[in-house]
Image (cartoon, rainbow, N blue to C red):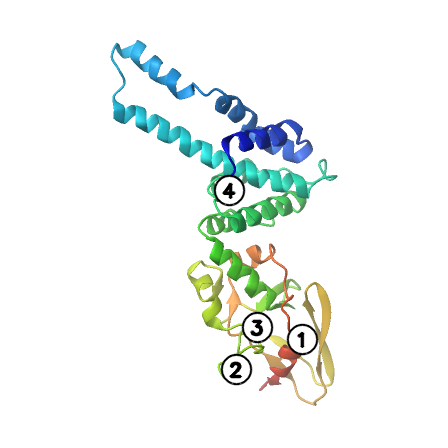
Amino acid sequence: MVSAVGSAGRITDVAGKASGVLGSIADYWGLGRWLDRRSRSKDVDAAVERYESLYGTGMPDEVRDLLYAKYVAESRRLDNLTEVLSIVRDARRGRDDTGTKPQQDWLDAFEDGASHAYEDEIRALWAQLLDEEITSAGSFSKRSLATLKGMNGTEARKLRVLCSWSVEIRDQTGRWVPVPLLQSPLECGAGANGIPLSEVSMLEDAGLTTQMPGHAPDVYVPPNSTCVIRVNATPATLRNDSDQLRGYRPTYAFTSIGIELAKLCVLGDADADLPSILQSRLSLVER
């Protein structure tokens, strides 16, 4: 966590220098007012004096401690939010006046989550999420914000790893959907064709993945034809040189929330030939 002095400097930079959409968001969250409050080191002492003047008696120690604890807790959350906004500001240099300010209820949910981000991996995800939401409004639901708020750094790293082993397949609506390539139960060891389920099982508890059928689109390659998938945003081709329909039915999938949060990761950049792995898993489809 950044120091109090360092945080104040960041707040000044974000609240005072940010412009456009990001500056409007900083104003909505009242970061400038926060800085003004934080700079008055006698805030809590003033509250104690006010109490004593009103009630003619000293403030009980437990109440005084509660005031200080609340001030410290709010300051820590401010540090986190400022750190996230600073990352977004750096990422959006030169794009200050582009994008759309999210709705107030969405910003409230974001502030609640990002202000509790104490790990660098989680802060980075919050920052990227806000950047992308400003760029493309409606990309992330409040349910996704609630899920990200509950994630820890280990889960964030596992999500990135799972995304690296994922290809994109078109569903029936034409939308590209990330589909993870798990290691086959018959495969093991280094360089195996997929990621072991044991490595990412915690993501099911986080609500990001599921083994329930129907959550991922099936892959079908018509006879003597091809099918296009995407790997690391690059088109790749699956082939079927037979006279019969061949396909692949995923056994592991991202949930709807997982699909949204997967936008924050690079899809398909694992050190492996993912198209060849998927090609090898195509099997005859009974009509």
How far is disc 2 from disc 3 in space, using C-alphas? Answer: 12 Å
* Mark 4 residue type: Ala
Depth-wise, is mark 2 or mark 3 nearer the camera?
2
Taking 112 as reference, is 240 above or below it? below
Report the residue marked by disc 3.
Answer: 181
* Mark 2 residue type: Glu
Mark 3 or mark 4: which comes first in sequence? 4
Taking 267 as reference, is 144 above or below it? above
Report the residue marked by disc 1.
Answer: 275
Residue 105 point in image, percent of width and height: 51, 38
In this view, the residue farthest toward the bottom is: 243
How far is disc 4 from disc 2 in space, using C-alphas? Answer: 40 Å
Look at the numbered disc 1 and give the secondary structure of its residue: helix
How far is disc 1 from disc 2 in space, using C-alphas? Answer: 17 Å
Mark 2 or mark 3: which comes first in sequence? 3
Report the residue marked by disc 4.
Answer: 114
Depth-wise, is mark 4 or mark 2 nearer the camera?
2
- Crowding near the residue tagged with mark 4, few <14, some 14–19, many ≥20 C-alpha atoms within 10 Å: many
How far is disc 3 from disc 1 in space, using C-alphas? Answer: 10 Å
Q: What's the residue at 60%, 28% (across, down)?
A: 12
Report the residue marked by disc 2.
Answer: 187
